[in-house]
Image (spheres, rainbow, N blue to C red):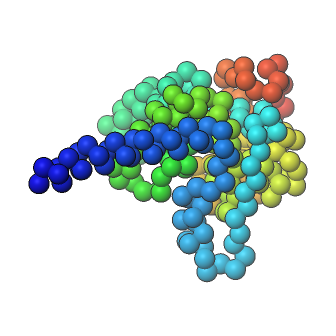
């Protein structure tokens, strides 16, 4: 019994820690070509003949700065300030829930990246615990620039479409390096539900959301590690 308990409470956690730490360190430098979500989606749509997975890795310097600014404006305006968890947003979400409103998501880009890269999708508290663990790991080891680079390459941006390069080519017929602020805002606006919203065929609500994202892009802090640190003018679509 002592050996069993030692294995469960000592060796197993230690092995997990060492393996997960090694994986985090490796992926700081190695591109992420496959994620658990991609595998899940492949099985979900296995009966659809026209379904395909489109994935093209691009380094951050080959992705338009507009795309990074758009996802921060849409998903995580305090991305540069927090250490993985936006406690202000979490408090706001809990307060809204207490008032009887629908519980809204408060996941940061760091949390979403950790979930996408290391975990299969689920809604259990156990999965949330692992998500928090990996979020702390990538914040400590990767840093903000690498987190953004990985996020912009693995985020689901349409049915079978993963990453900014694939989204740019499939939806707008161009490379991610040439995405405009409007196109980036439309892609970011689809992220809450990329299986139903299409950036190239936006609804009235999607267009309105993209406009709000563009306005926010001009208000949030610009990372010093983007390709061109000079502020860019945002031209809103009428």
Spot occupied by residue 39 in the image (x, y as percentages of width and height): 57, 64
Numbered marks: total:
0
Spot occupied by residue 164 in the image (x, y as percentages of width and height): 74, 47
Q: Is 224 located above or below residue 208 in the figure?
A: above
Quadrant where the image shows the N terminus: bottom left
Q: Quadrant of residue 63?
A: top right
Inspect this view and state whether residue 115 appears: yes
Inspect this view and state whether residue 205 appears: no
Spot occupied by residue 134 in the image (x, y as percentages of width and height): 46, 40
Q: Which is more toward the observer, 55 or 3?
A: 3
Quadrant where the image shows the C terminus: top right
Name the residue at the left extreme.
1
Spot occupied by residue 31 in the image (x, y as percentages of width and height): 68, 46
Q: Which is more toward the observer, 216 or 143?
A: 143
Query: On the picture, is 226 further left or further right than 140?
Result: right
Which residue appears at 66% of the width and 54% of the height?
33
Q: Quadrant of residue 101?
A: top left
Q: Which is more toward the observer, 11 or 220?
A: 11
Which residue appears at 47% of the width and 56% of the height?
121
Query: On the picture, is 237 further left or further right than 9?
Result: right
Which residue appears at 63% of the width and 42% of the height?
151
Which residue appears at 13% of the width and 49% of the height?
2
Q: Is 42 located above or below residue 28 in the figure?
A: below
Q: Is 112 located above or below residue 141 in the figure?
A: below
Q: Which is more toward the observer, 96 or 142?
A: 142
């Amino acid at each position: 019994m002592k050996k069993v308990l030692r294995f469960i409470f000592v060796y197993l956690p230690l092995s997990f820690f060492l393996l997960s730490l090694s994986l985090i360190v490796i992926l700081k430098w190695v591109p992420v070509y496959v994620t658990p979500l991609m595998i899940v989606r492949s099985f979900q749509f296995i009966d659809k003949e026209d379904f395909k997975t489109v994935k093209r890795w691009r380094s951050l310097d080959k992705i338009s700065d507009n795309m990074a600014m758009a996802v921060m404006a849409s998903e995580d305006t305090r991305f540069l300030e927090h250490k993985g968890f936006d406690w202000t947003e979490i408090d706001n979400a809990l307060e809204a829930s207490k008032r009887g409103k629908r519980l809204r998501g408060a996941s940061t880009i760091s949390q979403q990246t950790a979930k996408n890269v290391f975990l299969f999708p689920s809604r259990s508290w156990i999965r949330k615990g692992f998500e928090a663990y990996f979020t702390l790991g990538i914040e400590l080891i990767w840093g903000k620039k690498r987190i953004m680079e990985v996020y912009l390459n693995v985020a689901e941006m349409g049915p079978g479409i993963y990453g900014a390069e694939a989204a740019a080519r499939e939806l707008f017929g161009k490379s991610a390096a040439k995405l405009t602020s409007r196109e980036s805002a439309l892609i970011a606006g689809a992220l809450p539900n990329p299986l139903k919203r299409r950036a190239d065929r936006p609804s009235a609500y999607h267009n309105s959301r993209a406009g709000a994202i563009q306005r926010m892009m001009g208000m949030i802090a610009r990372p010093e590690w983007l390709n061109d640190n000079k502020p860019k003018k945002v031209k809103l679509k009428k």
